[in-house]
Amino acid sequence: MFGGFNREIGIDLGTANTLVYVKGKGIVLREPSVVAINNDTKEIQAVGEAAKQMIGRTPGSIVARRPMKDGVIADFETTATMLRYFINKTVKTRGILPRKPFIMVCVPSGITEVEKRAVIDAAKAAGAKEAGTIEEPLAAAIGANLPVWEPTGSMIVDIGGGTTEVAVISLGGIVSSRSVRVAGDEMDEAIAHYIKKMYNLMIGERTSERLKIEIGSAIPPEKEEFMEIKGRDLVTGLPKTIKVSSTEIAEALSETVNNIINAVKMTLEKTPPELAADIMDRGIVLAGGGALLRNLDRLLSQETGMPVLIADNPLDCVAIGTGQSLQHRELLQNQSKRIKRTK
Ligand SMILES: Nc1ncnc2c1ncn2[C@@H]1O[C@H](COP(=O)(O)OP(=O)(O)OP(=O)(O)O)[C@@H](O)[C@H]1O
């Protein structure tokens, strides 16, 4: 019924970024999941990239916030407004959104039925003929081209902004999974904390993220790299510039990285032996922006004794998988009926 060319849209409603995928066109919108609100009037000042630029730079009355912080919908009203804004922006600026599309929205696993309903309502309010939701690990696995519909075990580790979702999937369903609130945001916080402790320097969220992306690594890299950063000296209260090394950032990240590795190990321990053997053959697949942290694949492989691969487009996997899942709506519906029956 919804098979018409590009009437299907997938939206990855992520903690850090929201992506819109249109069948036949690919990813057409990619913006930070940030909303700036005027606290006095409660009016929305900016959404997406414009709002992200405001983080840490707003006057008292305006707050730039991430309505999905920690991988859950912390502020539903704002999330719904943000979703509507992104759908409308896709229609207006690109003019490619089909009329009355079917919209599939990827949501963090473990959100409540009420929250799912509210996401569906927000998508409908933004013009969807019909809307559905898919859980993030399943979408990531589809986007990473794992054989999720077959009777074989696949393991996906999706390291996003707020959460790391580890799941073993077989026959279109999640067999065992673990979701921990330790991912990219926590890495940024760990870096800021380390710089404060070692240098008495306060740095902003965006500076820590740059350190992580530019010189961060899960194990100290063979070739040392350095980066200059600016912050506020906590002793003098004045701006100051310092030079930080990649070894220092690896040290700052070690605890967070270990927590992610432990989540993978715990999920492997709960995985039935036949499926574990399949994963051993195929390897653990990393997705999400956190998969790009240098040497994380190497360290995870050393720690688990399993092959570890990074998905082709780790940042886009979930959005692509969400869009592609529409082709398998019937399988998804059957699967969720099966899961409800066995609960
Ligand atoms: N090269 C990189 N190295 C390390 N981390 C990176 C890199 N590029 C992006 N990231 C991090 O990836 C995270 C965003 O990933 P992604 O877009 O997959 O998250 P999300 O889907 O929005 O979040 P969630 O899955 O929690 O809902 C951010 O924390 C970002 O800093």
Image (cartoon, rainbow, N blue to C red):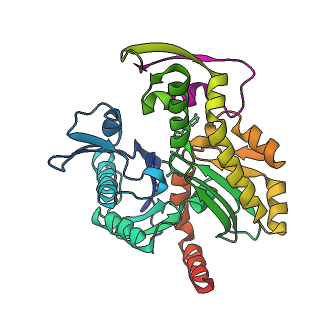
Residue, far left: 41
Confirm whether the magenta stretch covers residue 217. yes
Seen in the picture, residue 316 relative to 240 is either above or below; the reply is below
Percent x, y of residue 149: 68, 68
**Location of residue 77 in the rendering, given as x and y in whole percent from the top left corner:** 29, 60
Residue positioned most to the bottom? 341
Picture residue at 55% right of the left edge, 67% below the top: 327
- Residue 258 or 161: which is nearer the viewer? 258
Residue 14 visible in rendering: no
Q: Which quadrant is home to the N terminus?
A: bottom left
Nearest to the observer: residue 288 or residue 100: 288
Q: Quadrant of the C terminus?
A: bottom right
Q: What residue is at 65 percent from the left and 48 percent from the top?
A: 260
Q: Is residue 276 left or right of residue 28?
A: right
Query: What residue is at 56 percent from the left and 29 percent from the top?
Result: 194
Instruction: Please provide the residue range marked out in magenta.
Output: 210-233
Q: Residue at x 34, y 35 (%)?
A: 55
Whether residue 239 appears in this view of the structure is yes
- Report whether 265 appears left or right of 161: right
**Furthest residue to the front?**
235
Choose top left, top right, bottom left or bottom right for residue 8: bottom left
Q: Percent from the top left, x then y, of residue 243?
A: 55, 14
Viewer-proximal residue among 261 and 141: 261
- Horizontal and vertical percent position of residue 69: 43, 50
Determine whether, in the image, residue 20 is placed left or right of residue 212: left
Picture quadrant where residue 289 is located = top right
245 lies above or below 288: above
Q: Is residue 239 magenta?
A: no
